[in-house]
Structures are given as structure tokens and as C-alpha cells.
Image (cartoon, helix red, strand yellow):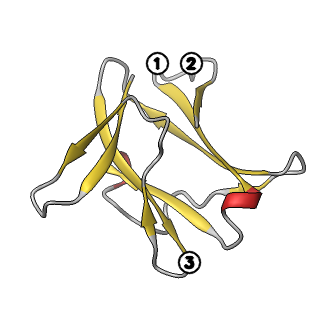
């Protein structure tokens, strides 16, 4: 699930990527166009409300592809993403439009 927070002072949009702990027992990161697919850039942190989340600042009126990567090496999409696209490798990525 993705929730948008109040805009950042720099004019960017804050997107909060959220996953339930029950579905992600091991550490997870969100990777995408916004962080050059870097698995260390945005790890989802455990929260007291039973979720993991990470906040990413994004340009408004833009389209981003992304996926989640678990510490065990499993890639997975966000079923609640705005859309899903097939990439140049024939794999499906989640899409977020700001």
C-alpha cells in the first residue's frame, strides 16, 4: 500500500510505502526508478502498528516503476499499485503515478 503525506518543503511529494509485518517476516526494501534500484536506499522499517514502511520523496506529476525485495532475495509487486508494467526482461513491475 502507498499513502501520500503532506508535500515536502522542496516541492516533492512524500510517498509512504507500507507492508504488513504478517506478510513480510524478513527485512524488505523498496527499489525503483526513484532510487536507481538500490536495495540499500529505502529499507522498510518495523513500526509499532504491525507494519513496515519507508518514505520516499518523489517529483510531482511523474510515473515510477518499483518492486519490493526481501532480504532472502525474493522480488514482489505491490498489488495495490496504480498499474503494473512488463519491463525489458519480461518481468512485471509495480507502477506509481504521482
Quarter containing the N terminus: top right
**If the image is split into quadrants, where does the C terminus sit?**
top left
Q: Secondary structure at mark 1?
A: loop
Give the residue furthest to the bottom.
72
Q: Which mark is residue 7?
A: 2
Q: Is residue 56 left or right of residue 35?
A: right
**In terms of image quadrants, where is residue 84?**
top left
Instruction: Give the total of numbered labels.
Output: 3
In the rendered image, residue 94, in percent from the top left (x then y), is placed at: 35, 44
The x and y percentages for residue 6 are 63, 18
Callout 2 environment at 10 Å: few (<14), some (14 to 19), or many (20+)? some
Q: Between marks 3 and 2, how big is the CA–CA gap? A: 30 Å
**Disc on the earlier residue, 1 or 3:** 1
Badge 2 element:
loop
Pointer 3: what residue? 71
Whether residue 45 sits left or right of residue 9 in the image: it is right
Q: Residue at x 55, y 29 (%)?
A: 14
**Left or right of residue 57, residue 63 in this image:** left
Q: What is the spatial separation of the Cα atoms under label 1 and label 3, in whole angstroms?
A: 32 Å
Quarter assignment of residue 62: top left
At horizontal 42% and vertical 67% (from top left) the residue drawn is 75
Neighbour tally class for label 3: few under 14, some 14-19, many 20 plus, Cα within 10 Å: some
Towards the viewer: 55 or 93: 93
Left or right, 45 with respect to 4, comes to right
Residue contact at pointers 2 and 1, CB within 8 angstroms: yes
Please name which of the two marks, 1 or 3, marks the residue nearer to the observer: 3
Mark with earlier residue (3, 2): 2
Q: Residue at x 36, y 49 (%)?
A: 66
The residue to which callout 1 is attached is: 11
Q: Nearer the viewer, residue 13 or 91?
A: 91
- Seen in the picture, residue 78 relative to 71 is either above or below; the reply is above
Amino acid at each position: 500500500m502507498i499513502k501520500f503525506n503532506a508535500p515536502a518543503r522542496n516541492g516533492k511529494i512524500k510517498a509512504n510505502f507500507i507492508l504488513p509485518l504478517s506478510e513480510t517476516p524478513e527485512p524488505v526494501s523498496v527499489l525503483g526508478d526513484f532510487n536507481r534500484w538500490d536495495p540499500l536506499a529505502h529499507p522498510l522499517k518495523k513500526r509499532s502498528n504491525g507494519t513496515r514502511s519507508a518514505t520516499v520523496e518523489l517529483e510531482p506529476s511523474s510515473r515510477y516503476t518499483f518492486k519490493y525485495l526481501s532480504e532472502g532475495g525474493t522480488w514482489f509487486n505491490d498489488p495495490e499499485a496504480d498499474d503494473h508494467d512488463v519491463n525489458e526482461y519480461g518481468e512485471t513491475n509495480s507502477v506509481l503515478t504521482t
